[in-house]
Image (cartoon, rainbow, N blue to C red):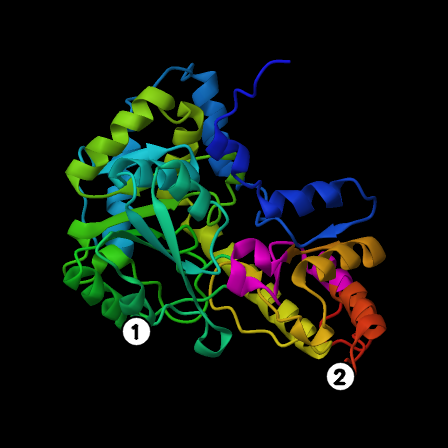
Amino acid sequence: MRRSFVKKSMAELPSSGIRKFFDMASSIRGVISLGVGEPDFVTPWHIREASVYALEKGYTNYTANSGLAELRKEIGRHLLQKYQVEYNYDKEIIVTVGASEAIDLALRSVIDPGDEVIIPEPCFVSYKPCTAMAGGVFKTIPTREGEHFKLMPQDLEKAITPRSKVLLLSYPNNPTGATMTGKELAQIGRIAQQHDLLVIADEIYSELTFNGEHVSFASLPGMQERTILINGFSKSFAMTGWRIGYAAAPADITAAMLKIHQYTVMCAPIMGQMAALEALKNGNGEVKKMADQYDQRRNLIVNGLRQMGLSCFEPNGAFYAFPSIKKTGMSSGEFCEKLLQEEKVAVVPGSTFGRCGEGYIRCSYASSVEQISEALERMDRFMQRHAKAGVTTSSLSASPYPG
């Protein structure tokens, strides 16, 4: 018998909890999935057409490692006009294979073995594994529903040690939908300056902010020189499968990121880059329409969850609701498995996003109104069967939000 050739750290690395429930749901007929965070909108036609045209014109070659110059220029214009932060397109912007690759590049470019990466939880599932794969040590900070799942300055201060090097922020947040104001982020920025921290700001949901305006972390005083700004086209332009993202950072950091990118990926696909260019130039109208639709769905799902007796923090960004299921007496994993088996509704256990996510579930409202309404009716039946003593539920049969 041969020995195991798999690297020990990789063998011990857990698989994505989101994908686990997605795979479970795909094996059951009639499931309504509120699990995977993927827009139900099709990429707008003029964006798709730009890619088709690129193929017809024979654009099937490599681009520069950092991406098409015209696309990087347009990203720079977008960041300046939208968020008042200016980058040199030639030295400070890289087009990546989705925001996920940008996060991986960022961590691998700045982390030496043993460096600490501070991560507020609940958080996206890739942050901790990517930190570990980069040789770093992740240190989590729990955020709390009573504080609107925002990173509290005093909690950050307590978490910092001499080994702390990076703060990984994500607002609007996946899975909670929490946002932070410019004033609140500025407090975090001052602490980062005092302790000489680099901030990786994952702002993939920046265009989906429902109350107030999104403030880019790099736009705060003194922050651009110590921020890696991550963004992309998946969520705002409904381009998940195109896998086009980008990173903007000081030139020395992007130079390091580019080395890894050029040796492992070479470049993002040119057809996707051409589509992304069209999206930035002419797609803002569709972004606004989709955001308005998400806002309506947000109100529908939050009100529906509350109506059935679940406490639900009001998300102000992204497209997720994060209700508490603590009153049921079930763990988040047990709740999700039973809901899937009994009512064929797929949601994700809050524990997937960190220890402090236990007692919550993530429900994506990037689905049609009809599907959300039907899912809420099924969840209401489930809640009525499984409600513990003292838990009030009310039927959604007379819901003011029909499917």
| Disc 1: which residue | 154
Q: Is residue 376 left or right of residue 273?
A: right
Q: Quadrant of the C terminus?
A: bottom right
- Determine the image quadrant of residue 311: bottom right
Q: Nearer the viewer, residue 172 or 350?
A: 350
Query: Closest to the observer: 68 or 304?
Result: 304
What's the amino acid at mark 2? Thr
Quarter of the image where the N terminus is located: top right
Q: Nearer the viewer, residue 251 or 342?
A: 342
Which residue is outermost to the bottom?
Answer: 390
Is residue 353 found inside the magenta-colored segment of the image? Answer: yes
Tell me which segment is drawn in magenta.
349-375
- Residue 58 placement (x, y as % from top left): 42, 14
Instruction: Give percent across and percent down for residue 242.
Output: 49, 33
Reply yes or no: does residue 127 show up in magenta. Answer: no
* Residue 187 in view of the camera: yes
Q: Residues within 10 Å of mark 2 (few under 14, many from 20)?
A: some
User: Of discs 2 and 1, which sits in the foreground?
Assistant: 1
